[in-house]
Image: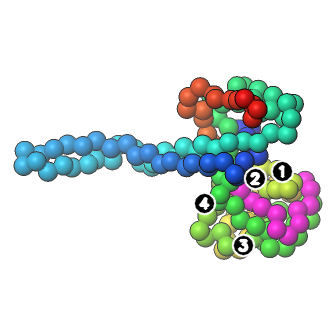
Amino acid sequence: MPPPIFDAPVAWNEKYIERRSYYTAIATSLAGIEHRARLRARSRVSIEYTAHFDGDDQFKQYHNFLYDYGNYGIALPLWTEYITLTSDAPAGTTTLYTSDTSSRPFKVGSSVLVQPSNSAHQAVAVSANTITLDTPLPLACPQGGRIYPLATGYLRKELQVRLADE
């Protein structure tokens, strides 16, 4: 079962920070030359942003969501890596015609979030301008709709939550 999606709306007027960290070891030779050895196959990515909620009910819903699932893994849309639909996608379709996918992290087997239908799918085929989904779209999506890649994430530290009026 895929992890639940944390799709809290981003407050784009605030900071959106993406960090990459590498894990290496440094050894110094007798001649004083430093040598670095990679200890992790890929870099870790951390994302930090401010979410905007419409009222206390939505705030409480996402707050409880993070406490319930944050340590077990959540699917986080990579908000800055989206592509757009170049034609309407009727409900029930599995092939989406999109803008160029080559510069974005879409690949076969990856999970995607399709909006405005707000549905998660797995990509079974990816070409330069199409993505084929494993399951049909539940709702129609108009031209200009967005497709976001999903990454599995975990809370690294204690959740920091505050109301906007504090």
Question: Is residue 2 at all visible to an observer of this figure?
Answer: no
Marks 4 and 3 in Cβ contact (< 8 Å): no
- Report, in whole angstroms, how far the alpha carbon at label 3 lies from the one at label 2: 15 Å
Q: In terms of secondary structure, where does tag 4 sit?
A: loop
Label 3 crowd (10 A; few <14 / some 14-19 / many >=20): some
Q: Are marks 1 and 3 in contact (CB under 8 Å)?
A: no
Q: Quick one: SS at disc 2? A: strand
Pointer 1 and pointer 4: residues touching (CB < 8 Å)? no
Image quarter of the N terminus: top right
Q: Residue at x 86, y 35 (%)?
A: 55
- Dot 1 or dot 3, earlier in sequence: 3
Element under label 3? loop
Looking at the image, the residue that sits furthest to the left is 31
Q: Residues within 10 Å of mark 4 (few under 14, many from 20)?
A: some
The residue range painted magenta reads 138-148
Q: Residue at x 85, y 30 (%)?
A: 56
Left or right of 37: which side holds 118? Answer: right
Across and down, in percent, residue 103 comes to 59, 68
State the mark number for residue 118: 1
- Mark 4 and mark 2 in contact (Cβ < 8 Å)? no
Residue at image x 92%, y 56%? Answer: 139
Task: State the image coordinates of residue 87 (x, y, percent, origin top left).
Answer: 84, 73
The numbered mark, 2 or 4, whose residue comes first in the sequence reads 4
Question: Along the polypeptide, which appears first: circle 1 or circle 4?
Answer: 4
User: Which x, y percent locates residue 127?
Assistant: 67, 71
| Disc 4: which residue | 105
Name the spot of residue 107 as percent of width and height, x first.
63, 60
